[in-house]
Image (cartoon, rainbow, N blue to C red):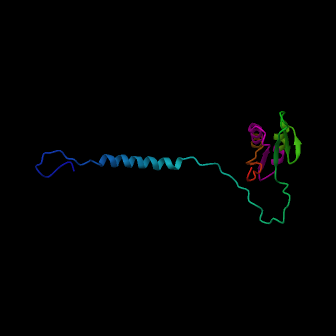
């Protein structure tokens, strides 16, 4: 391309594409390496509706920790409708989950609470050895 067969001694107006192909291949390799490293989102478990709606039975294996707002004061805490003090939550959760294979807990908080109060309960669950912690949110109706 840079050489010509004739005796014409003029300038060559052809573009040398070899360096451009080298740059293209380097960029291709860089993007091939970067793409698998992209972070992925959190793994979630979506609750499934019951298969038989006529056979509604109470699941006593479900652990729900409620954080209830008391106005401007400190929130109150319940584990499956039994009231507990804040300092008693972690030992009670450790006692509950010590003998269980499935370590699943749900946390339900009032909408008026600061999330740090709910995050404390989530941390208590992690300290008690709970593997999966779900958040229960209030149902939002259409039109509100």
* Residue found at x 68% / y 52%: 44
Residue 95 lies within the magenta run: yes
User: In the image, is residue 53 above or below residue 25?
Assistant: below
Q: Position of residue 117 (x, y in %)?
A: 77, 37
- Residue closer to the observer: 35 or 50: 50
Number of marks? 0
Query: For this view, does 19 lie left or right of residue 143?
Result: left
* Residue found at x 39% / y 46%: 26
Residue sitting farthest toward the front: 143
Q: Position of residue 86 (x, y in %)?
A: 84, 37
Query: For this view, does 114 lie left or right of residue 87?
Result: left
Q: Which residues are magenta?
A: 93-122
Residue sitting farthest toward the left: 7
Q: Position of residue 70 (x, y in %)?
A: 85, 37
- Residue closer to the observer: 5 or 102: 5
Residue sitting farthest toward the top: 73
Q: Which quadrant of the figure has residue 85?
A: top right
Query: For this view, does 11 lie left or right of residue 95?
Result: left
Q: Which quadrant of the figure has residue 118?
A: top right
* Residue found at x 22% / y 51%: 1
Can the viewer see residue 11? yes
Can the viewer see residue 98? no
Q: Position of residue 123 (x, y in %)?
A: 75, 40
Residue 1 lies within the magenta run: no
Query: For this view, does 55 lie left or right of residue 8?
Result: right
């Amino acid at each position: 391309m840079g050489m010509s067969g004739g005796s014409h001694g003029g300038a060559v107006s052809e573009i040398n594409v070899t360096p451009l192909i080298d740059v293209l291949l380097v960029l291709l390799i860089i993007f091939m390496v970067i793409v698998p490293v992209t972070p992925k989102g959190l793994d979630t478990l979506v609750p499934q509706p019951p298969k038989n709606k006529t056979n509604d039975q109470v699941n006593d294996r479900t652990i729900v920790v409620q954080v209830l707002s008391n106005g401007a004061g400190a929130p109150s805490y319940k584990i499956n409708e039994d009231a507990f003090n804040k300092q008693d939550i972690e030992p009670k959760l450790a006692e509950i989950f010590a003998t269980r294979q499935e370590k699943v807990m749900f946390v339900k908080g009032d909408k008026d609470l600061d999330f740090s109060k709910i995050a404390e309960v989530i941390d208590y669950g992690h300290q008690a050895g709970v593997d999966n912690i779900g958040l229960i949110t209030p149902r939002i109706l259409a039109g509100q």
